[in-house]
Image (cartoon, rainbow, N blue to C red):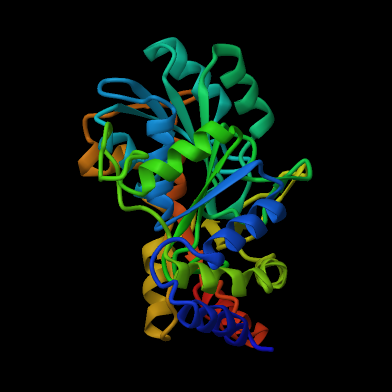
Amino acid sequence: MSDAGYELEYIHDAFAKNWIAPLGENVTEFENSMKSWMGAEYAVALSSGTGALHLSMLLAGVSKEDKVFCQDLTFAASANPIAYVDAVPVFIDSERETWNMDPVALENAIQQYGVPKAVVVVHLYGNPAKMDEICRICEKYGIILIEDAAEALGSTYHGQKCGTFGEYGILSFNGNKIITTSGGGMLLCKKEADAMHALKLATQAREAFPWYQHTEIGYNYRMSNICAGIGRGQMKVLTERVALKRAIYQRYKENLQELPLSLQPMPGNAVSNCWLTTAIIQDGYDITSIKMVSALSACDIESRPLWKPMHAQPVFAEAGYVTAGHESVSEDLFRRGICLPSDTKMKMEDVDRVCEVIRSLF
């Protein structure tokens, strides 16, 4: 059966049982299958990964003027929920071995700003962060760790799935992710009480009364039974999708190894899902990431620079930013980095064509 066949089977079942809105068998089974696949204690299916991050802030007790330390090199959705709860973001620079949050910079930030309410670590482009060191720091100071694994479904660190290290883990099923529910996300929790509270908050925080009664502000964040049906279908091909992403990365690595490019490094104790294959251009060449993006675009090949660091975004201009030393690693990666086409629908011949264009630039 094709991917769409699996998905349509569950969607048709939802229509047949008239379970279109949130709740229903698809939601429950999608949560159960993802929880089992991840090795997580509890899972709550939501309308987006951003909603999951927002709920994690609330569950962590983050409130107005609390400090939250967040990875600097990431998509804005990692940081925006900090603003949703009127907390104060402080952005932590990357290290070069994984491009993720630098544990040294994290310690520096604690010395400079004090102990934060929470830390948001991101597995950038699917590459696991240095979780041993980051978890150790959070445990040392009693900091709640929120793990943004939106890009890292299928990545592992010491054999453990990314998204299951923190007190809260976030997954995304947006249209550009390894599996998609057209939109959607999931919150992973270690405690049943947190999962139940998240479920309540995601369904407008209705209390157990015959009438609609509310003692706290709620949100419309629950995943629909239709979207969950798509997710159930795609769970059947998740392992295959991850293998395809890794094969694409390996093809790029083989084709580009003699060029002055470096793919995102992978430490030996981690296995990335290779959600996006990314590279940085070595210094000393008259080729910038923008020039490479333009050259690929001229050949109808879509690419883009790496995420622009959060501390450099106008909306976070007043936020704090901490590095491990004098240089900004995230700024340097942004200046020289590029995201290459990595869709699982690509054939290896497509990857070869991208590499031909890149080779013509040097």
Q: Residue at x 68, y 72 (%)?
A: 236
Seen in the picture, residue 36 relative to 310 is either above or below; the reply is below
Residue most extreme to the front? 210
Seen in the picture, residue 211 relative to 146 is either above or below; the reply is below
Seen in the picture, residue 195 relative to 182 is either above or below; the reply is above
Instruction: Please say whether residue 236 is visible from this viewpoint.
Output: yes
Total numbered circles: 0
Residue 254, horizontal then vertical, whole percent: 72, 70
Residue 4, horizontal then vertical, whole percent: 57, 85
**In front here: 2 or 339?**
2
Instruction: Please say whether residue 260 is visible from this viewpoint.
Output: no
Picture quarter containing residue 160? top right
**In front here: 82 or 282?**
82
Q: Residue at x 40, y 58 (%)?
A: 47
Q: Residue at x 61, y 18 (%)?
A: 139
Q: In the visual, does 118 lie left or right of 319?
A: right
Q: Quadrant of the N terminus?
A: bottom right
Residue 152, horizontal then vertical, whole percent: 59, 53
**In front here: 287 or 193?**
193
Q: In the visual, does 159 lie left or right of 196?
A: right
Picture quarter containing residue 302? bottom left
Q: In the visual, does 90 lie left or right of 176?
A: left
Residue 70, horizontal then vertical, whole percent: 42, 33
